[in-house]
Image: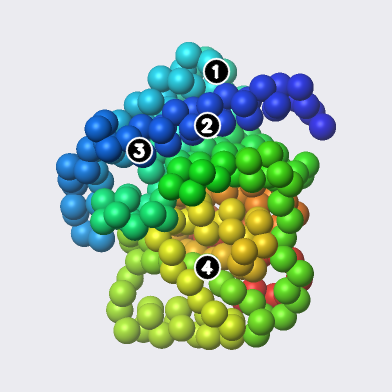
Amino acid sequence: MQYKDEIEAWLSIAEKAALLAGSYLLNPEQQSKNINSDAGRDIKIAADVESENIILNFLKENSGFSILSEESGMIQRNDRRFTWIIDPLDGSLNYLRGIPFCCVSIGLWHEQSPILGVVNDFHHSELYTGIAGKGAWINGVKIRISSVNEKKRALLCTGFPINTDFSTESLLSFIQKVQGYKKVRILGSAALSLVYIASGRADAYMEDDIMLWDVAGGIAIASGSGCKCEINAGSHPNAFRVTVSNGNFDVN
């Protein structure tokens, strides 16, 4: 594997950054749930920004790579071989409402290809890590995909991104896509949905026009655990149609 020694070091950097941000988000004396923006179907809270600042400062101190973040956009730096892609708080509304299903997500990508990922499920003390094509782990223990081999027996995770068209026609099309699955879950965090596929807790994930920072860390981990990952351009900048599964059945 090219950059083998460096990848281990980069993974360690991402782990430390995600843990620092998770510690902040769990600390009731530090965290802020003030709403900064509540436009349309999206919501931004102060904790998103504070978590991002923690991650950005750590990455800038320990790496020269460019950074793409949900809050700050693209930050070009001297070393542009790779790009850190971060979501400082995936599942902001869950976090705001006290639903313990949210996380910190950090991915390292080379152009359109994932290299490594870290997802910190700080509420449940589960740190997911993965190196694309090599392996994936929860708290250092290797994880594997499920063995489910039929769509009618599979658990699908999906969601409605902020740009979703909620017209009757669009919703009927969505129903047609998911009705062949045994169960469907909309969990409110794309990154955690993806690592659930990677760890065999669920079997497939698909979402249209999901933002890259929502899925960058999770896709790298899913790739490491042996998932089949398909990423196609969406209808908005930095948005993609993402399909991830255990590879044992046709998800469409």
Specify the quadrant of the image occupied by residue 42. bottom left
Which numbered disc flags the more N-terminal residue, 3 or 4?
A: 3
Which numbered disc flags the more N-terminal residue, 4 or 2?
A: 2
Secondary element at image label 2: strand
Q: Name the residue under label 4.
A: 157
Q: Callout 1, which amino acid? A: Ser
Left or right of 147 in this view: 187: left
Specify the quadrant of the image occupied by residue 174. bottom left
Residue 10 pos. (x, y %): 63, 25
Q: Mark 1 points at which residue?
A: 63
**Of circles 1 and 4, which is in front?**
4
Specify the quadrant of the image occupied by residue 161. bottom left
**Of circles 4 and 2, which is in front?**
4
Secondary element at image label 1: loop
The answer to whether marks 1 and 2 mark residues whose Cβ atoms lie closer than 8 Å is yes
**CA gap, disc 1 to disc 3?**
23 Å
Asked if residue 17 is positioned above or below residue 146 in the image, the reply reads above
Point out which mark residue 25 bears.
3
Q: Name the residue under label 2.
A: 84
Which class describes the residues within 10 Å of circle 4: few (<14), some (14-19), or many (20+)?
many
Which numbered disc flags the more N-terminal residue, 1 or 2?
A: 1
**CA gap, disc 1 to disc 2?**
9 Å
Which class describes the residues within 10 Å of circle 3: few (<14), some (14-19), or many (20+)?
many
Q: Callout 3, which amino acid? A: Leu
Residue 13 pos. (x, y %): 57, 24
- Residue drawn at x 46%, y 43% is 122
Q: Which of 234 and 150 is in front in this view?
A: 150
Left or right of 242 in this view: 89: left
Q: Callout 4, which amino acid? A: Cys
**Of circles 3 and 2, which is in front?**
3
